[in-house]
Image (spheres, grey):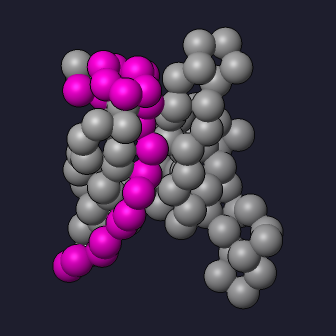
Amino acid sequence: VLIYHGVSKTDSCYRVGLMLLDKEKPEKILARTKDFVLEPAADYEKSGLYQGCVFPTGAVVKDGTLYVYYGCADTVTGLAFTTVEELVQYTKTHSC
């Protein structure tokens, strides 16, 4: 699983997407989410040094749960979480 961010050319907003890479050949993309999975919504994600910006900074898996730490408007750090199984399934079913 690759968790990445990209910036929109239309509104300069940073959002988060997901990719599944082949375990043996990580240059091979198995699936990529068609749309973003996280975008600035809360005030602390929209207002700060860089407004309208969320970007993954680290991830930890513990007991099947994936915890993703992410930057918010270059001011604070947020935490999103889900199960690894749900994340993989979501990426497969919402792939472009």
Can residue 41 be seen here? The reply is no
**Residue ID at (67%, 12%):** 10
Q: Is residue 90 visible?
A: yes
54 within the magenta span: yes
Q: Nearer the viewer, residue 31 or 78?
A: 78
Magenta-span inclusion, residue 20: no
Pick the residue in front: 76 or 39: 76
The residue at the point 65 percent across, 49 percent down is 32
Residue lying at the far front of the rendered structure: 49
Residue 8 figure quarter: top right
Residue bounds of the magenta highlight: 44-63
Left or right of residue 18, residue 8 in this image:
right
Residue toward you, 95 or 73: 73
Question: At which x and y percent is residue 71?
Answer: 35, 44
Q: Position of residue 87 (x, y in %)?
A: 41, 56
Residue sitting at 27 percent across and 62 percent down?
67
Q: Is residue 19 above or below residue 62?
A: above
Name the residue: 72% across, 76% down: 26
Q: Quadrant of residue 40?
A: top left
Left or right of 35? Residue 70 is left
